[in-house]
Image (cartoon, coloured by chain):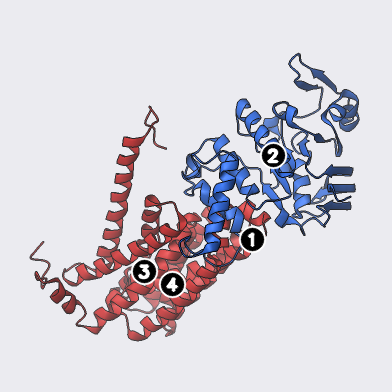
């Protein structure tokens, strides 16, 4: 292990200095921080609302969007945000208010996902780019982030988080107790649409950095881990963001000193964290369970 | 007039083109504990939806707490029909009750340490959880609680805004008999001490019979209202169902309705709940 971590010394401050020596690394850290904050917060609501499948659909659609934008000579961001925005609108039409989940439409959405991936592959082929283009669309360009991209991401994240803060409490109500929220006058249908659009923004922003396939490392795993640790909404939300930031920073840091890509480290760290937390929970549940049968809850 | 909580005159309710019930006149006074009875699909939940303003009357007029249905929803606590929260529901009972208090307000709540309003809200939540006797388990995930414990917390949620009226849709459905009696006793206590009008939709009148002031009985496309001894009788129910129906009383005071044309429950999904 020590051999692979070339350049890592026993001086943490010196290593940190080395990390921020190159502008691409600074921009990667900035972009990672912005995206992790956004994904941690919006992902927490997504996991709570059991809309992981919708999130997955959006991330799959991000790929043909980006590939199409490349083919048309448009900025990548336009492709990501355009495709995710349209897909979010389409999803909100499929899941009308009153239906609790997308499960009944899962087959139809699965069909669209497959078509979307095929379309993306076609665009990449037409572009006759090298395999590296396909790879970065699917697995991210963590270290190829430009200063302009960072600036766009910052404003997008700020707007998304401001909207989330404004609708936070009614959204929580609608997410955990839809029927009562609707009866008390919460516009659950409107909130569902706004949330899907926010989710589209979060997926598009995250996909720009992690690629379409690794979006979930930040959007699902940290929130799911946080919800294993606490079920209180406030602390859970903070923890989700903190975990997303931690895996992003650590992943970037480790990748800098290792031959393996950032995406691998970020996904592995968040996966390891999730598995560890689940194991600890199982052990604690076994120790403190009063149920003599010890059946899983 | 001021003591009248609900009034329906010549009311007809429709779900789509299908009339659920028609020609119904009701009058419920403030502070009464009323059971809404009838077979599946007879329009019990439909009545609650109309009182909440979620569904408009086809014909006739409805007055709720002196206003139009829908204009007074903030003063009504509502508990929709549902079986329970499944084990995967990762939310505390306490948070669910809190959402009943201020879940409709925009913005993000501040921690109690920073905001007097949040402290007052937390205090009110503790108070109402205490009132329904749920303090011991309100901090556990609601999905991990028993049906009776969940119902107590849901009643606390419906009560937390100090409503003038409670509309409870089959809160006893998933409970065993002793718990049905206990929850009905709790609802009656709240009804009398807080002066809240309660409409409780139920399948079986017997566990709650000792606590009731009046009943509303829907069947055969119509509905009648009165004291249990007036309504749950052979002649009244025969007129309602349109076929001869008998009401038998067992030695321990239970009422058994015999001869109704109610189809078997498993052939008749609960389409009156209109999700």
Disc 3 with disc 2 on a shared chain: no
Q: Residue at x 18, y 75 (%)?
A: A16
Spatial CA distance of label 2 from label 4 is: 42 Å
Q: Residues within 10 Å of mark 1 (few under 14, many from 20)?
A: many
Q: Colour of chain B?
A: blue
Residue bearing mark 3: A36
Q: Which SS class for mark 2?
A: loop
Tell me which chain the residue with mark 2 is part of.
B
The residue identified by callout 2 is B270
Spatial CA distance of label 1 from label 3 is 29 Å
Compared with A123, B39 (above or below) is above
x and y percentages locating residue B255 in the rendered image: 77, 22
The shade of chain A is red
Return the x and y of residue B172 as percentages of the image width and height. 65, 34
Chain where mark 4 sits: A
Give the quadrant of residue B85: top right
Q: Secondary structure at mark 1?
A: loop
Residue A98 in the image: above or below residue B179: below
Q: Residue tagged by mark 1?
A: A186
Q: Which residue is mark 4?
A: A204
Q: Chain of mark 1?
A: A
Q: Residue at x 56, y 56 (%)?
A: B121
Distance between mark 1 and mark 4 Cα atoms: 28 Å
Which residue is outermost to the top? B251
Q: Residue at x 39, y 77 (%)?
A: A126
Residue B97 pos. (x, y %): 57, 50
Q: Are marks 1 and 4 in contact (CB under 8 Å)?
A: no
Q: Judge from the rendering whether residue B177 lies leftward or rightward of residue B16; answer left or right.
A: left
Q: Residues within 10 Å of mark 3 (few under 14, many from 20)?
A: many
**A14 over B134 or under it: above or below:** below
Could you tell whether A194 is left or right of A53 in the image?
right
């Amino acid at each position: 292990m020590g051999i692979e971590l070339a350049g890592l010394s026993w001086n943490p401050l010196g290593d940190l200095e080395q990390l921020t020596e190159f502008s691409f690394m600074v921009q990667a850290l900035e972009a990672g921080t912005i995206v992790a904050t956004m994904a941690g917060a919006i992902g927490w609501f997504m996991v709570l609302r059991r809309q992981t499948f919708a999130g997955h659909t959006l991330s799959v659609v991000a790929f043909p969007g980006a590939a199409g934008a490349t083919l048309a000579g448009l900025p990548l961001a336009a492709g990501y945000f355009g495709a995710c925005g349209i897909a979010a609108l389409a999803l909100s039409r499929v899941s009308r208010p009153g239906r609790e989940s997308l499960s009944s439409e899962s087959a139809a959405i699965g069909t669209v996902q497959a078509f979307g991936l095929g379309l993306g592959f076609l665009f990449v082929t037409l572009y006759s780019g090298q395999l590296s283009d396909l790879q970065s669309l699917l697995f991210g360009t963590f270290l190829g982030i430009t200063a302009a991209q960072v600036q766009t991401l910052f404003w997008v994240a700020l707007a998304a988080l401001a909207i989330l803060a404004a609708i936070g409490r009614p959204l929580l109500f609608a997410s955990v107790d839809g029927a009562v929220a609707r009866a008390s006058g919460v516009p659950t249908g409107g909130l569902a649409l706004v949330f899907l659009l926010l989710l589209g923004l979060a997926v598009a922003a995250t996909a720009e950095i992690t690629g379409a396939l690794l979006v979930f490392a930040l959007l699902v795993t940290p929130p799911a881990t946080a919800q294993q640790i606490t079920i209180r909404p406030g602390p859970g939300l903070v923890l989700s963001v903190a975990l997303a930031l931690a895996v992003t920073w650590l992943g970037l840091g480790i990748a800098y000193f290792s031959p393996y890509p950032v995406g691998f480290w970020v996904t592995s760290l968040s996966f390891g964290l999730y598995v560890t937390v689940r194991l600890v929970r199982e052990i604690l549940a076994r120790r403190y369970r009063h149920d003599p049968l010890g059946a899983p809850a | 007039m001021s003591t009248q909580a609900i009034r329906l005159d010549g009311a007809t309710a429709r779900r789509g083109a299908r009339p659920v019930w028609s020609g119904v006149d009701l009058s419920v006074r403030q502070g009464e504990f009323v059971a809404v009875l009838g077979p599946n699909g007879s329009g019990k939940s439909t009545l609650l939806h109309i009182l909440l303003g979620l569904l408009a009357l086809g014909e006739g007029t409805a007055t709720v707490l002196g206003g139009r249905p829908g204009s007074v929803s903030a003063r009504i606590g509502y508990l929709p029909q549902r079986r329970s929260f499944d084990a995967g529901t990762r939310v505390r009972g306490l948070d669910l009750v809190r959402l009943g208090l201020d879940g409709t307000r925009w913005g993000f709540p501040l921690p109690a340490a920073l905001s007097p309003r949040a402290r007052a809200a937390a205090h009110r939540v503790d108070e109402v959880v205490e009132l329904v006797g749920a303090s011991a388990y309100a901090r556990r995930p609601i999905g991990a609680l028993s049906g009776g414990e969940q119902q107590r917390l849901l009643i606390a949620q419906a009560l937390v805004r100090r409503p003038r009226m409670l509309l409870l849709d089959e809160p006893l459905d998933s409970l065993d008999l002793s718990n049905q009696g206990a929850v009905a006793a709790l609802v009656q206590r709240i009804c009398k001490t807080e002066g809240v009008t309660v409409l409780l939709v139920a399948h079986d009148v017997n566990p709650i019979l000792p606590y009731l002031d009046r009943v509303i009985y829907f069947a055969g496309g119509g509905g009648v209202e009165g004291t249990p001894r007036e309504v749950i009788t052979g002649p009244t129910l025969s007129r309602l169902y349109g076929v001869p129906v008998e009401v038998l009383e067992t030695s321990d005071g239970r009422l058994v309705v015999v001869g109704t044309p109610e189809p078997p429950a498993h052939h008749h999904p609960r389409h009156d709940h209109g999700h």
